[in-house]
Image: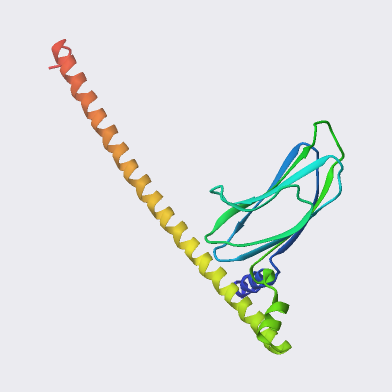
Amino acid sequence: MEFYSYLFAFLLMLLVPDVYSLMFHLPANQKKCLREEIHKDLLVTGEYELSDAPGQKTNLAVTDSKGHILYSKQDAKKGKFAFTTEEYDVFEICFDNKMIGGGHGADREVSLIMKHGIEARSYDELAKAENLKPLELELRRLEDLSKSIVDDFAYMRNREEEMRDTNESTHSRVMYFSIFSMCCLLGLATWQVLYLRRYFKSKKLIE
C-alpha cells in the first residue's frame, strides 16, 4: 500500500507543468547566471523582460556545459528564445549588466519564464496546422504527457542502472584494494620477523 502511495505522489509530480517563472534584481556592473539540468530531446522556450535602466546595457547568453552558445542577445530588453536539447546536459542562462561609461546605476528588474517538455509546445498552433478538434487536441496533449512520463521512467531506470554499475565497480575495487593491502601487510610482517630472527641470531641472542 505504501508503494502505491509513493507511486501516486510521483505521478502527481510528473503532472506538474515544467514551467517556472523568476523575477530578480540585477545590479549594475554585475552578472547573474541560472543553471538547470534538462533531459535529452526536449524543446525549451524562454521569455524574458528587463525593466528600463538609462545608461545600462544587459547582454543575454544561453549556453550548455561545453560552452556552445544556443542563444545570445546584445542589449537585451524583451524577447523570446527556443532550442531543442540534443543530450542530457546542464544549461546556463546569464544576464551580464554593464554601465555605459562606467559609474553606478539602479538595479534592473529581470523577469524570466522558462518552459520545457510538453509545456513548451504550442498546441493552439498545432490545432490550427492540423485542423484538430478540441477533443482531438486534448487527446494529443494526453498522448504527449504519457510519452513524457514513460521517458522519465526510462531515464530514471537508466540512471538507476548506471548507479548500480558504479556501486558494484566501486565495491570490487575496494575489495581488491583491501586484499592487496592485507597481502602487503602480511608480506611486510613476515619480512620483519625473518629479519629480526636473522639479526638476533647474528648477535647470538637466540639459537
Residue 37 seen anywhere in this rendered image of the structure: yes
Query: What colour scheme has been applied to the protein in the rendered image?
Result: rainbow
Asked whether, in this view, residue 68 is left or right of residue 12, the answer is left
> Nearest the camera: 3 or 148?
148
Q: In terms of image quadrants, where is residue 58?
A: top right
Q: Is 152 rendered above or below residue 55?
A: below
Quadrant location, the N terminus = bottom right
Q: Position of residue 203 (x, y in %)?
A: 16, 10
Quadrant location, the C terminus = top left
Asked whether, in this view, residue 180 is left or right of residue 111, the answer is left
Asked whether, in this view, residue 93 is left or right of residue 42, the answer is right
> Nearest the camera: 148 or 167?
148
Residue 112 seen anywhere in this rendered image of the structure: no
Q: How many marks?
A: 0
Q: Is 181 rendered above or below residue 119?
A: above
Q: Position of residue 110 (x, y in %)?
A: 80, 51
**Rendered residue at 63%/70% (across/down):** 6
**Rendered residue at 69%/84% (across/down):** 137
Q: Position of residue 41 (x, y in %)?
A: 55, 66
Q: Position of residue 166 (x, y in %)?
A: 43, 54
